[in-house]
């Protein structure tokens, strides 16, 4: 078989192109330190790397959501701690002045001023904000939840934050549960009878129903005529509302404090004594709310640990698949460089002859 000059030139060009392509790929791997720079380098591994990165980005977003919800819950827990301390102080004062032996009209009048300050501080706690959002307003985070009279302008909504796929946790406790004793006792994680609205129309329906319910409650309360001031208020509180811990009815924290203040100002010893029971219920109510917050924080902390571990695992998986072995790459570059030099030397000798050589 005769080897023509054209065939020799083609073979030389083919070998040089292949060697230079290999050299260029190795140089690219050395520069990027990545074995996979485009899907065609390794289609299967490239798909797995993309899946790992997608999951990593999702986990990072979940971590952002969780940190936002955790900040909300931590502020709520701090606020409930302060409220609990205020109620305990109010109970101490009520115990000291519940009998004629430990108090008189003058001392009760002085103590009533401190109870008034405790009441005002409780309202301030109910109106506490994180950033620009009220933490005890339910869905109405831009509306001040409580008036100085104790009237509630929020709703019973639980703002749920997604912490994992198909997993949500409530990041707030509505003020109606903590301060008014309405419906406290859910875990904040699964709330079948109070799901988060999925669109604007559902949110509007929820808010309209909430307004109607609140108007109905206000109408019922307006029809009630007290007969003995704070003593009758405390009896009504015990007969109509449940304590969420013991199973008896919950109480209105503001009504309890205001009733105690009125009893002290009017020197009504029986009213002060009856306020002790409702103060116990109010303290239990706040403690129960704190336990809900603590349970949610525990769930969030556990998810933070698992998500951080998942982020590390995804990075490790992607690194194993796409990162280049630097030592192996440098060794291959040296081999490719030697091969390229050898190819150039042999090719130069092979194609050295030309038409001018034959014409000499």
Image (cartoon, rainbow, N blue to C red):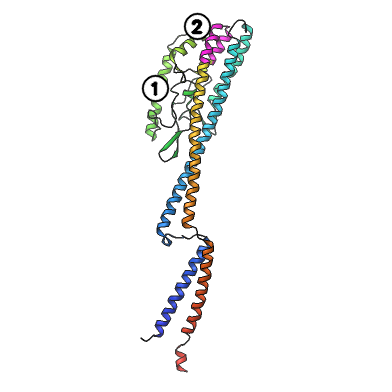
Residue at x 49% of width, y 30% of height: 295
| Residue 141 image label | none
Cα distance in 3D space between marks 1 and 2: 30 Å
Q: Quadrant of residue 90?
A: top right
Residue 144 visible, this orientation? no
Tag 2 secondary structure = loop
Q: Please, which residue is most extreme toward the left here?
A: 1
Residue at x 40% of width, y 83% of height: 6
Give the labeled residue for mark 1: 212
Give residue 320's position: percent from left, percent from top: 48, 55
Residue at x 53% of width, y 67% of height: 331
Q: Main secondary structure of the magenta part?
A: helix
* Residue interval drawn in magenta: 257-279
Give residue 250's position: percent from left, percent from top: 46, 18
Residue at x 50% of width, y 71% of height: 336
Establish if 305 lies above or below 242.
below
Give the labeled residue for mark 2: 228
Q: Nearer the viewer, residue 12 or 247?
A: 247
Q: For mark 1, does the 10 Å Cα neighbourhood hold few (<14), some (14 to 19), or many (20 or more) residues?
A: few
Q: Quadrant of residue 358?
A: bottom left
Quadrant containing the N terminus is bottom left
Mark 1 / mark 2, whichever is N-terminal? 1
Establish if 242 lies above or below 201.
above
Q: For mark 2, does the 10 Å Cα neighbourhood hold few (<14), some (14 to 19), or many (20 or more) residues?
A: few
Tag 1 secondary structure = helix
Residue 140: say if magenta: no
Left or right relative to 251: residue 97: right
Q: Nearer the viewer, residue 148 or 8?
A: 8
Q: Nearer the viewer, residue 262 or 76?
A: 76
Q: Total marks drawn?
A: 2
Residue 73 visible, this orientation? yes
């Amino acid at each position: 078989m005769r080897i023509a000059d054209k065939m020799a030139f083609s073979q030389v060009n083919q070998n040089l192109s292949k060697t230079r392509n290999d050299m260029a790929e190795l140089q690219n791997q050395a520069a990027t330190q990545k074995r996979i720079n485009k899907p065609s380098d390794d289609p299967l591994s490239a798909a797995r790397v993309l899946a790992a990165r997608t999951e990593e980005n999702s986990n990072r977003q979940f971590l952002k959501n969780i940190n936002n919800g955790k900040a909300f819950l931590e502020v709520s827990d701090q606020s409930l701690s302060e409220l609990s301390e205020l109620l305990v102080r109010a109970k101490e004062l009520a115990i000291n002045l519940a009998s004629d032996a430990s108090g008189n009209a003058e001392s009760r009048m002085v103590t009533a001023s401190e109870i008034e300050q405790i009441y005002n501080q409780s309202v301030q706690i109910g109106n506490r904000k994180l950033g620009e959002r009220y933490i005890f307003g339910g869905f109405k985070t831009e509306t001040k939840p409580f008036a100085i009279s104790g009237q509630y302008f929020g709703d019973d909504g639980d703002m749920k934050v997604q912490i994992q796929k198909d997993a949500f946790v409530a990041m707030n406790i509505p003020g109606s549960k903590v301060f008014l004793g309405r419906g406290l006792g859910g875990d904040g994680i699964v709330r079948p009878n109070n799901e988060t609205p999925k669109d604007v129309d559902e949110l509007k329906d929820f808010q309209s129903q909430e307004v109607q319910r609140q108007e109905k409650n206000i109408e019922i309360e307006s029809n009630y005529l007290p007969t003995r001031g704070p003593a009758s208020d405390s009896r009504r509180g015990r007969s109509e509302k449940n304590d969420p811990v013991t199973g008896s009815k919950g109480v209105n924290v503001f009504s309890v404090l205001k009733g105690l203040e009125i009893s002290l100002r009017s020197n009504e010893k029986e009213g002060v004594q009856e306020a002790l029971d409702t103060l116990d219920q109010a303290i239990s109510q706040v403690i129960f709310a704190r336990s809900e917050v603590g349970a949610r924080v525990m769930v969030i902390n556990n998810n933070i640990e698992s998500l951080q571990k998942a982020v590390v695992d995804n990075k490790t998986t992607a690194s194993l698949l796409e990162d280049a072995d630097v030592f192996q790459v440098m060794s291959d570059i040296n081999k490719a460089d030697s091969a390229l030099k050898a190819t150039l030397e042999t090719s130069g000798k092979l194609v050295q002859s030309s038409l001018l050589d034959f014409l000499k």
